[in-house]
Amino acid sequence: MSDNLTITLIQSSLHWENPEANLNMFSEKITAIKGKTDLIILPEMFSTGFSLNAEAHAEESKSSSSIEWMKNTAMQKDCAIVGSLMLEESGEYYNRLIWMNSNGKFQQYDKRHLFSFSKEEQIYTAGTERLMVELNGWKICPLVCYDLRFPVWSRNSNDNTYDLLIYVANWPERRNYAWKQLLVARAIENQSYVIGVNRIGNDGNDLYYSGDSMAIDALGNILYHRRDEEDVFTIELKKEDLNTVRKTFQFLKDADSFVIDSKSKIKGH
């Protein structure tokens, strides 16, 4: 088995609050992917766009047609798929990232940092634990949009907790400078590959999204960047290159030591 990881980023416009149209659209894009990929990354709230209208559009987590679609698609394509959805569970709403494995089993992460500027925290419940997954020998930490602004939450450790940091997003164009700079910063400070997948186009609130999806290596070099257009891009990440960077520049061992416990409290020691 290769030490490399093949990943497909899907930067797309979204049909506002229309899961059926979005799932059909992504099905077409995924079907058209040529060759083998290990992981497909979709944007934040890929079935609806970033909506606060959870009462009308959130799917019940145990009977979600979008999760079922992810399961069927992952099994058919023989790869993992990740993206976030608007979901309801026990009377509460979540901006929930679903990591769907190729065998149809999934793990989940509830967005920790809710975007108070748009009053997201008044609708959705924040998560309390990070998710770490493994895929083909790679350790991966998937996060959601606004989490990007908070480096402690994504902090890597000297024992290399993860090799790849992923952000799925609906990040408006008017703040895209921060998006681009922070993605590079997260890669450099954590000595990790970083991938950010954002949507494009206008949403139902007439906010414009430029995409600016990116893949970045552990030195901060931009391996892929696309703006203002739909794109399905496949890239191979090389474990040997990552290991060389970490062996040559052993910066993580000099970092402040902090631990995020299960209740997301930060402990310094």
Image (tube, helix red, strand yellow):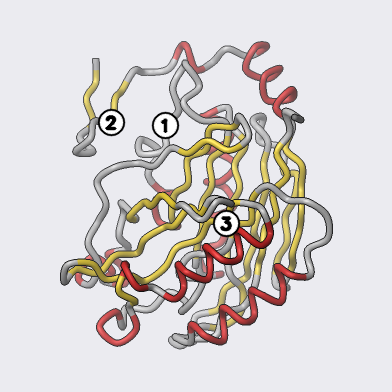
Q: Earlier in the sequence, mark 2 or mark 1?
A: 1
Residue at label 3? Answer: 81
Q: Is residue 169 visible to the viewer in this orientation of the structure?
A: yes
Q: What residue is drawn where x is 56% and y is 61%? A: 176
Residue at label 2? Answer: 260
- Separation of residues labelled 2 and 3 (CA atoms): 26 Å
Please report contact status of discs 2 and 1: CB closer than 8 Å, yes or no.
yes
Q: What residue is drawn where x is 63% and y is 66%? A: 211
Q: Quadrant of the N terminus?
A: top right
Q: Is residue 87 left or right of residue 190?
A: left
At mark 2, the secondary structure is strand
Amino acid at the residue labelled 1: Arg
Q: Earlier in the sequence, mark 3 or mark 1?
A: 3
**Is 89 located above or below residue 18 in the figure?**
above
Q: Nearer the viewer, mark 3 or mark 1?
A: 3
Residue at label 1? Answer: 155
Q: Is residue 198 left or right of residue 233?
A: left
At mark 3, the secondary structure is strand
Q: What residue is drawn where x is 71% and y is 77%? A: 28
Amino acid at the residue labelled 2: Ile
Q: Is residue 178 visible to the viewer in this orientation of the structure?
A: no
In the rendered image, residue 32, in percent from the top left (x then y), is placed at 79, 70
At mark 1, the secondary structure is loop
In the rendered image, residue 52, in percent from the top left (x then y), is placed at 32, 78
Residue 44 vs residue 187, the one in the foreground: 44
Q: What residue is drawn where x is 58% and y is 38%? A: 135
Q: Is residue 134 left or right of residue 53?
A: right
**Is 256 located above or below residue 187 in the figure?**
above
In the rendered image, residue 9, in percent from the top left (x then y), is placed at 67, 58
Would you call the spot at circle 2 few (<14 residues within 10 Å), some (14-19), or many (20 or more)? some
